[in-house]
Image: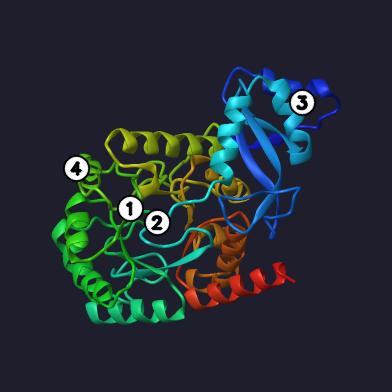
Amino acid sequence: MDKIEGSVLRSPADVRGFADFDGPLYYVPTGFIDRADDPQTLPLAGGRRGFSALEIIRRRENGGAKSMILPLLALEGWVQNSGRVDEINAVIDRLTGNRRAFANQDMDSSHIMGIVNVTPDSFSDGGDHNTVERAIAHGRALAGQGASILDIGGESTRPGAAAVSIEEEIERVVPVIRALADDGHCVSVDTRHAAVMAAAMEAGAQIVNDVTALEGEEASLEFVSQSDTAPVILMHMQGEPGTMQDNPRYDCVVLDVYDYLLDRIESCERAGISRDRICVDPGIGFGKSLTHNMELLSRLSIFHGLGCPVLLGASRKSFIGKIDPSASPKQRLGGSLAAALNGWRQGMQILRVHDVEQTVQALSIASAIGTV
């Protein structure tokens, strides 16, 4: 059992029961509106969007979790009677506080990260940009379409992907990174290997994007720590790419992923990587079933409670194909845009996408509608 079951609150005792629970509580902003200066809302992660209620979740002793939703107007009374005043005040500070710039990118609004796979076997575009010249041209095109970050990867992490040697991965990504960084673009390197991180940063990459959250190699955590200023994206993945989709299991996927990312943040802080250098990614599609992905997508805003920018990477992922089996990876634009808009609505600071031009247009229209 890994779903969150919303409870029907019939009396004040139902509400008090959450506060009386000995274990941790988790807080999910909901009831979103576009104007964060509304007096009945709070700003979401310091951005223009606001939230008007909190879903409060606790684990069940026998697995899974239950939740209740409190409007902000009722929250203060509950907090005063809960014995958790300091806890909830700290959570509200993290949920509402301004995010510091990440790799010199302002985190008050959603940024588009364009995907540049210099690989022959990535799940949706393998081989499309599998030469240095084509990859550089593609990165420049994505930047021209509105991508403020370009994510360069030289190893496919799709389920069952073949391993790539460190040397080959470096040969694939470094010339591309150097050219795009020399153009003045903000570049991240998508790798789980410390040696590739080092070569990429020397070539001009500004961000390390690691699907193993710096756990893949012991040297990775040490490298980012010693780099002093390098921002890092920590992603959740259950298992490893070759087997991660065999039989993913969770007690409660939303809370399990949250706890994992919190643990990784704290490990990074102990190693000397400050929280303002960290972005988190719940890892849609990495060791998750369709149900797991849907649960995460419905409660992405919980991750603002970690006090870091949040990245959503759902573009062309297999969960779209499971909902629409007729759609091959390159025919998943509609599903990708739906996921991106859902992430934007929940305040995601970075949206990692293949289809930059279409995503920029969708966000522009959604934003314009919200300001009418």
Marks 2/3 in contact by CB < 8 Å: the verdict is no
Tag 1 or tag 3, which sits nearer the N-term? 3
Q: What residue does disc 3 label? A: 15
Circle number at residue 102: 2
Give the SS element for disc 1: loop
Quarter of image, res 191: bottom left
Q: Hey, what amino acid is under mark 1?
A: Pro
Mark 4, residue position: 219
In front: label 3 or label 4: 3
Q: Is residue 355 visible?
A: yes
Q: Which quarter of the rendered picture does the C terminus lie within?
A: bottom right
Which quarter of the picture shows residue 101?
Answer: bottom left
Q: Amino acid at mark 2?
A: Phe
Q: Residue at x 61, y 20 (%)?
A: 61
Q: Which residue is mark 1?
A: 231
Kindly check if marks 1 and 2 are in contact, taking CB atoms under 8 A apart as contact.
yes
- 354, above or below 32, in the image: below
Q: Nearer the viewer, residue 320 or 70?
A: 70
Discs 3/1, front: 1
| Inter-mark Cα distance, 1 to 2 | 7 Å
Whole-angstrom CA distance, mark 2 to mark 3, is 38 Å
Is 288 drawn above or below residue 341 in the view shown?
Answer: above
